[in-house]
Image (cartoon, rainbow, N blue to C red):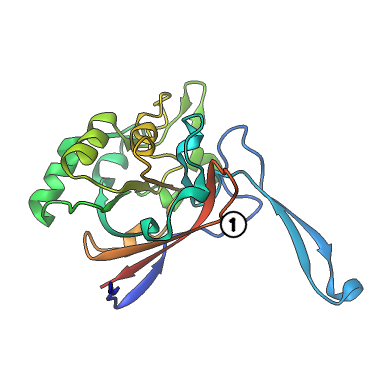
Amino acid sequence: MQNIQFDRIVDLSHLITPDLPVWPNDPPVIFTTQASLQEDGYYLRNFSMGEHSATHMNAPNSFYPDAMGIDGYKPEALVRPAVVVDVQAHTCSNPDYVISAQDIELWEQVNGVIAPGSVVLFHTGWQSRWLEPGRFINADAQGLHFPGVGAAATRFLLEHRAIAGIGIDTHGVDPGQETSFACNRLVLAQGGIILECLNNLDRLPPTGSTLVIGVLRLQAGSGSPASVLAFVR
């Protein structure tokens, strides 16, 4: 029997609204009233949005043909210990900061070695920009500008720490200027977890949290909006 011991629960998901930040050219979030209390006796809406909008989880088939969709993750794979690596000291002055293996090694000197099977969450401070979509996406003629996890750091975590996945508070685990999506590809090639647009990472300690990740079981989905709860002890 496995038990989750906790003192508090932190919701790591953003509220889904029509004006939330979306990836360039992704579909908008749309709510449409289908039934009203006044006319039908009950209230019902239809909603549409991209599979990779709001706080969300990516699936391997978003980068690999014939790979597993979001409906392929087993429930037990979505309950994971988590650690939080705070890199705000770098990202506050450099929106294109690439998180390195050295950042992880320095974190481990203080907090201990990351345990196998963990999801590593990177707190860049980008969550504070959520209500300003332009600043959150941070695009110009040269592309998108937000921090993310470099390929070398991703390989280090997968090969030497046997992690289960990576999460971040920006719109992508890969840096905005990275067009090969190396972090996504490396993690998803192993059927791992990728969480993007996380919230409230400042409310988590470096260690001692357990994530419970809820996804919509969309048939062959390339991803899904996610409800991510952190049980903190």
Outermost left residue? 109
Relative to the observer, which residue lies in front, 51 or 111?
51
Q: Is residue 138 visible?
A: no
* Mark 1 residue crowding within 10 angstroms, few (<14) / some (14–19) / many (20+): some
From the viewer's perspective, tell me whether residue 40 is left or right of residue 160.
Answer: right
Q: Quadrant of the N terminus?
A: bottom left
Which residue does the image show at 26% across and 53% down from the upper left? 118
Q: Is residue 12 visible?
A: yes
Residue type, mark 1 in image? Ile
Outermost right residue? 39
Vertical comparison of 220 with 14: above or below = above
Percent of width and height locating residue 144: 47, 30
Task: Indicate the secondary structure of the residue bearing disc 1.
Answer: loop
Which residue does the image show at 51% across and 43% down from the upper left? 69
Query: Label 1 belongs to which residue?
Result: 16
Q: Quadrant of the C terminus?
A: bottom left
From the viewer's perspective, tell me whether residue 218 is left or right of residue 76.
Answer: right
Percent of width and height locating residue 67: 47, 35
